[in-house]
Amino acid sequence: MKYDRIYNFSAGPATMPVEVLEEIAAEVLNYKGSGMGVMEMSHRSKVFQTIVDEAEADLRELMGIPDNYKVLFIQGGATLQFAMIPMNLMKNGVADYIVTGGWSKKAYSEAKKYGKINLVATSEDRNYCYIPDLSDLPISEDADYVYICENETIHGTTYHKLPNTKGKPLVSDQSSMFLSRPCNVSDYGMIYAGVQKNVGPAGMVVAIIREDLIRSDLASKIPTYCRYDTHAENGSMYNTPNCWAIYVCGKVFKYLKSIGGLAEMERRNEEKAAVLYDYLDASKLFYGTVDKQDRSLMNVPFITGDKEKDAEVVAATKAAGFENLKGHKSVGGLRASIYNAMPKEGVEALVAFLKEYEANH
Ligand SMILES: *Cc1c(COP(=O)(O)O)cnc(C)c1O
């Protein structure tokens, strides 16, 4: 492959579009005649302000974000949001959580520090291999919000239908599926995503939050940085932001627009994931761990059912030049993360390898 790159199936930080990396490489020493690179410029400069403004405008266009939602670029990863969400969104001190895997479980545990958290549904009984029926949940009357992780990166499940929150604002962690398909933003109170899974480099979260949920009457003990109103009032630049991540994500937004937007991205993702799932469904050696109707298009865990064999396959994939296929310890086996930037050829090459491995073992 060009530049001796390999097919990298990492769950995150993850593979990025070569076209974007090439553009960045060309601009690293001198961004558009400014005489300096983006890593070196003041975040208060005109040239950087244009980068932020374009990134936000392009994201708004890609997702069709309504005017009554703010777009915020915040540091601290998705993990800081596990705390910021309850700190900021709780008025009654009550929230309902749906736990469908490792990431929603972490968010749930963190939120418990801040109020009364109800577990209204979970798929823990079968190691999070499905999304429970969410059509008639025991939503608390005084719940400030309902929380989900829309794509569980470790367990490989996705919501193909959103829960019925009975009128409460829905808060969704979209980290490992952000921009993988069209999204009707007005179905949510807040969407957030750590960008290092499906968009750009590590160290930043994009938060899309309905304006009426952003409060200015929060307790004075909440750290200034951890308030959404701080970021909203200062155009995501209360302090020095992650300039580099904003710049690179902006490039990816433009790239997604250039290929035809999120509908085209979804078409490609479906086609690509089908290559792997069709193989797994036909295989006598491997099987996918997730119930078919809840499978993720982004993270595909699969196992042989024998831990030693799994380890042998992982080692063989590595020797053949496929990186980061070892499954997370809580599921075992293998996991192929096939985000937006993984080309279909990468999945085809992996499937060809697995087929041959199966034939020889
Ligand atoms: C990776 C991940 C996180 C944590 O992201 P950090 O940026 O490392 O804090 C949270 N949620 C989901 C769904 C993830 O995939």
Image (tube, rainbow, N blue to C red):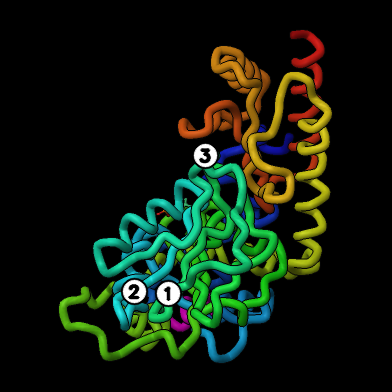
Single out the residue that lies furthest toward the left: 221
Query: Which label's residue is closer to the chain start, 1 or 3?
Result: 3
Three-letter amino acid code at disc 3?
Asn
- Disc 1 or disc 2, which is closer to the eye? 1
The residue to which callout 3 is attached is 127
Near mark 3 (Cα within 10 A), the count class, few <14, some 14-19 or many ≥20, is some
Mark 2 or mark 1, which is nearer the start of the sequence?
2
Q: How far apart are marks 2 and 3 (CA)?
A: 26 Å
Residue stretch in magenta: 45-52
For ligand 1, tell me if the residue under mark 3 lies within 8 Å. Answer: no
Which residue is labeled 1 in the image?
A: 140
Residue type marked 2: Val
Residue 354 visible in this rendered orientation of the protein: yes
Q: Is residue 246 among the parts visible in the rendering?
A: no
Q: Determine whether the residue tagged by mark 1 lies in a helix, strand or loop.
A: loop
Magenta span main SS? helix
Residue beneath the point at 29% across and 61% down:
112
Between discs 2 and 3, the one toward the N terminus: 2
Q: Nearer the viewer, mark 1 or mark 3?
A: 1
In the image, the residue with mark 2 has its CB under 8 Å from the nearest atom of ligand 1? no
**Label 2: which residue?**
94
Real-space Cα separation, disc 1 to disc 3, in angstroms: 26 Å
Q: In this view, does 39 lie to the left or right of 218?
A: right
* Separation of residues labelled 1 and 2 (CA atoms): 8 Å
User: Element at badge 3?
Assistant: loop
